[in-house]
Structure formats: structure tokens, C-alpha cells
Amino acid sequence: MYKFSDLYKHEQSSFSPNGAYVASIVEQKRLVVRSSTIDLPVLHVFECLHPIQHLQWSPNSKHILTVNYTKSIIQVWSLIDTYWSGKIRDESFGIRRVWWSADASSILCSTDFKLRLSVWMLGDQQVRYIRYPKFIDKGCEASPDGKYMAIVESRQGKDYIGIYTPSATALFKHFVTDTNDLANIRWSPNSQYLAVWDNCLYVCLLVYSVDGYLHASYQAYEHGLGIKVVVWSADSRLLAVGSYDQKVRILRTCDWTPISELFHPSTHLRMDINVIGQITDHVATRRPFNIPILRPDHSTPHPKIGIGYCQFNCNGKFLCSRDDSMPNAFWIWDISRLQCCMIVLQQQAVKQLAWHPHDPYTLAISCANRHVYLTERGPDDTFKLGPVPVPAADFCVRRLSWSNDGNSLLLIDTALYGLVRRDV
């Protein structure tokens, strides 16, 4: 049984990193902070000067920033001292994307035309600048242990990575990457490695340590579109690489050797793989079984084909993946046996998948309808899928997010949001 909170109006909502609060934008200029208990009581209300276009929690859950990109204004609010507030304004270069530093002492802002990253220090009210950022909206990542900030830079036609202190105010290491056109970076959960990969025209994955040492270089094939997504397992022992060729390749990090290729065909002949429909426990027994497929338009950028999503569960035993050309289906793989244990085919396109942060068998699925779909452990280490209807006629689950402790699931619609908890 599940217990639902009341629904509340909003424009945007998100859990705090510690899972204790829910912040939401209400009536454009109002920031409302609630406790994440099932009653969602209001704790604080902050009135902003301009319409809020984005909100973001600090890593320590003590501050929230709100942004108006049109006016290039950031306001900072404190949950520790509600009478304190801060304001950042950059009219000369504008503000296009914001990040908190790893230690929550600074705010990083990107500008138009990739001119610079501004580092605004909240403590001494000073600003420093990082020149030549490669991207406006990505390429700035805090390490999971909070000790480093990695920033992608581009100088004289070459890609560089700058490793900065937690406040992003001092450079620790600066090194050039062996990439043609770096697309993105991803820290390992243990903060020892940094995965780097090229854009989709190249098939190149590189793994560096914090000091710039190249641990691995991996190229699965030469011709064709390349990498779409890169994810680490929670223990940093495995690295999954999803590509345009409809495969997920699993690398073990002890020697950076590929141990398996997980293929996502649209036609299935094997009877030992459960293909489950949207109705609970409805298993398709007919073979061959065909999954509906969208024909991608290869004349457009980023065609809808290949692995657009893959994610390990909390203990790294299972991997969930989805092929963009089959938007109604997703796969669950047993990594210990390196084989598919279930394919789920929904009546509507799968919008979001989210593993429970602590329960290895619970996966939440959103299809933009009145249900949230949850898996649970079945017999013989299998999965069971069940729909949980939201008790509101005008609510569609468009996005969802687990709290850090896994006790609550935030359900988000365009104009409403609420919580759901398992009734123990």
C-alpha cells in the first residue's frame, strides 16, 4: 500500500540533497520550502525580486539559489539564517548556466559566447574568472567526495581539463586530453577517475585520474556514430558505455577490459527472457516478439537511435537501459550473469526511469500518465512490475525523483506536485 500527500501548485520543484526538504517555485516569484514528510508542511517562504526561471540546492542543503536568466540575476537564500540573502548580477556578460562549487562556498556562472566562467565567492564577496570554458551548459562537475571541481576548457583548438579546489578558486592540475572534440566528463563515485568521451562523430572513451594520468583509452569500433551515455556503477568497479549502435558495453575498472556487450534488438526469439506488458504480470509468450520501433531521421542532428539511457542500481547488480528508437520499452540486465532478465513494454513512451537509492529491486517508471510504475523483488531474484495510480484525475506523472533516504518519491506534473510513500 502507498500513501500520497496532497497536491500543490508549482512551476518547478526538487528535493534537497539530504532529502529533508522540498523546494518549489510558486506564482513565479515565490520560493517555498517544505519538509519532506508526507504532510509537506511549509517551513519557509522567500519572496524574489524577479520571476524565477531556475532553482538549485547547494550540496550541503543549507542554501538555495534562484536565477532569472533574462535579467542575469541570482538570488541566494539560507535555511540556517532566513534573514540573510545574497544577490549576484552580471549585466555585462549575462548568465546562462549556474553551478554550486563542491564545498557550497561559491557559485559558478557561464556567460554568452563561452567567454568565461565567473566564480562568485559568498564568504568574502569577491569574484574570480576562469577563462576559455568549452561549454555553456555542461563540462563543470564536482567530484562526489567534494574535494575537486573539474572544468572542461578549450584553448588553441585543444581540449583541456582543469582540476580546481572545492571552492573552484585555485587551480590544482591542468592537463590536455587526447580527444578530437570532447563531449562531456563524468566522475567515478569514488572520485578517483574522470571518464572523458568525444562527440558522436568519434568513438573514443578516455579515463584520467585527478593528476592527469591516462589510465585507459577505449574505442569499440571505428565507423559510425559513437557514444551517447557513460555511467559508473556505485562501487566504481564497472563502467557502462551506451552507443548509437544500440549496444551497452561493460568495462571493468581493475584492468579496463570490456567484459560484455548488451544488445537491444527489436525482435526477440528467446523464451528465457521475460517480456512484460503494461498490465501487471502480463508476460508475452509469443515468439518472435517484436517491439515497436521508430524509424530515425538520420538527416537531423542526434537521431533517435541508440542507447539514450542506462543506469546501474544501488549495488551494481542490475542495469536498466533504453534505446531511443524504441521509446515504449526498457531493459533490465543482470550484470552478475551478463544477461537480460526482463524487458518491459509500455503502452506509452517511457519518460523517466529512476532506481531506488537503497533497494536494489525497486525501479520507478514514468510514462506521463496517471500512474507511477514500480518494480519489486519477485521469486528467484526476478522483478515484478506494478502500476500505482495517483488518486487525482487531473495529474500526470511527468517526472519523478527519489529522496536521498529512499523513503519518499517526488511526483511532478506541469502545474502540480506531490509525494508518495510506501505505507509500512
Image (spheres, rainbow, N blue to C red):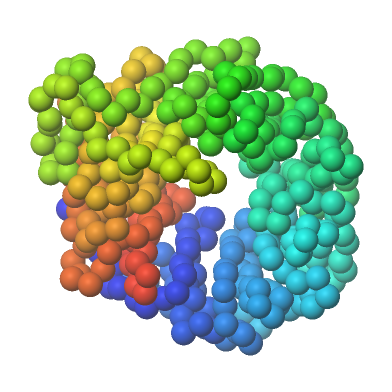
Say how many tags the image has.
0
Residue 78, can we see it?
no
| Quarter holding residue 57 | bottom right
Front residue of 20/277: it is 277
From the viewer's perspective, is residue 86 above or below residue 332? below
Q: What residue appears at the point 38 percent right and 49 percent down from the top-left corner?
A: 352
Give the side of residue 361 with respect to residue 255, left or right.
Answer: left
Task: Residue at 69%, 20% (x, y): give it.
Answer: 217
Provide residue 410's location: percent of width, then percent of height. 37, 60
Question: Residue 70: where, in percent of width, then height?
Answer: 66, 78
**In the depicted structure, whether residue 170 falls above or below residue 191:** below
**Residue 317 appears in the figure:** yes
Image side of residue 420 versus residue 379, left or right:
right
Q: Is residue 338 left or right of residue 217?
A: left
The residue located at (45%, 74%) in the rendering is: 11
Query: Is 356 placed above or below 219 here?
Result: below
Frontmost residue, 350 versus 5: 350
Q: Nearer the viewer, residue 305 or 295?
A: 295
